[in-house]
Amino acid sequence: MDLTTNVTGLQLRNPTILAAGILGSTASSLKRVMSSGAGAVVTKSIGVALREGHPGPVMIQTEHGFLNAIGLANPSYHEFTHELKEAKGEVPVIVSIFGRNAEEFKEVALGLIGAGPDAFELNLSCPHAEGYGASLGEDPNEVEKITRAVKEAVNVPVWVKLPPLTSIVKSGLAAQKGGADAVVAINTLPAMAIDIESRFPVLGNISGGLSGAAIKPVALKCVYDLYAALNIDIIGVGGVSSWRDALEFILAGASAIEIGSAVYEDMDVFRHISEGIARYLQDTGCDLEDVQGAAVR
């Protein structure tokens, strides 16, 4: 069964994509994911300058999923350029970028464009870095302004990753108005854990973002609502670990699915999900286009 799909003009061999922040810091780790069957990969979020990120611990596993507060640690776009050049090849490489304002986003995009990214994903949704991410993505005016600035500066598709806790449809419409080729829903949900022995929050940053199975119903609702309101591609992300999860997102309107936390449990999750979707389509006599958005009423 052919699972080739077109997302914002990019040809993907299947609809599974590595989510930002997971094994996306080096060319070697990105290539490892490509060899595991992913249809595309998204890099770690890259900014203007070197950031050390938040103090540790920055990531823990809870009974409901993973809790992280990395704090946008990254080497800067200057240092990341050679990794991007080396990662290019087998499948599309989408570069996640962040900034404090439209000017910084534009600077990072222009700084990396020479290394040949296939698309940019604007991180307007990180919940644990003050002044960045969700701080901007919750304001539709900022979403539109930043999206337009990057879109007008580069000649590759621009995806906008949105935060889930405000009116995501308003932010999605603002991204579309600014020229976005796709929106990505959702990032992690603000969350925390407390150690009852020490009586202190567990994460060094006190709070962080929750990912994994617990957030899938929230992400699914966001994709469903966005698909009903927008006329650009929607990429679903949040708690996908099986082909059944992925199919739910496709039925809700997703053109493709990003996978993050599940990679820690199964490096071959991209291949397993693709095989499951292919079996489902073959058994039902459908193709991907037939089922995309079929649940939206």
Image: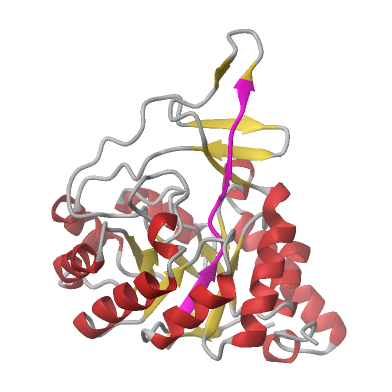
Query: For residue 224, what is the image quadrant?
Result: bottom right
State the quadrant of the C terminus: bottom right
Residue 293 pos. (x, y %): 72, 85
For residue 191: magenta?
A: yes
Residue 290 figure quarter: bottom right
Magenta stretch: give its range: 182-194
The answer to whether residue 285 is left or right of residue 185 is right
Residue 186 x %, y %: 56, 62
Q: Position of residue 149 (x, y in %)?
A: 24, 78
Q: What's the magenta bit mostly, secondary-structure-wise? A: strand
Q: Which corner quadrant holds the N terminus?
A: bottom right
Here the colouring is: secondary structure
Residue 217 as seen in the image, left or right of residue 145: right
Q: Is residue 47 above or below residue 168?
A: above
| Residue occupying image coordinates x 79% and y 74% | 279
Residue shown at the point (62%, 32%) measured from the top left: 61
Considering only vertical position in the picture, is 153 above or below 289?
above
- Could you tell me residue 87's position as x and y percent? 30, 61
Q: Residue furthest top?
A: 197
Q: In the picture, residue 291 is in which quadrant?
A: bottom right
Name the residue nearer the viewer: 189 or 19. Answer: 189
Residue 13 visible to the viewer: no
232 w.r.t. 122: above or below = below
Would you say residue 232 sits in the magenta stretch?
no
The answer to whether residue 36 is visible is yes
Report the front residue among 103 and 114.
103
Total marks in image: 0
Tell me if 21 is positioned left or right of 216 in this view.
Answer: left
Q: Is residue 114 left or right of residue 140?
A: left
Q: Residue at x 22, y 45 (%)?
A: 75
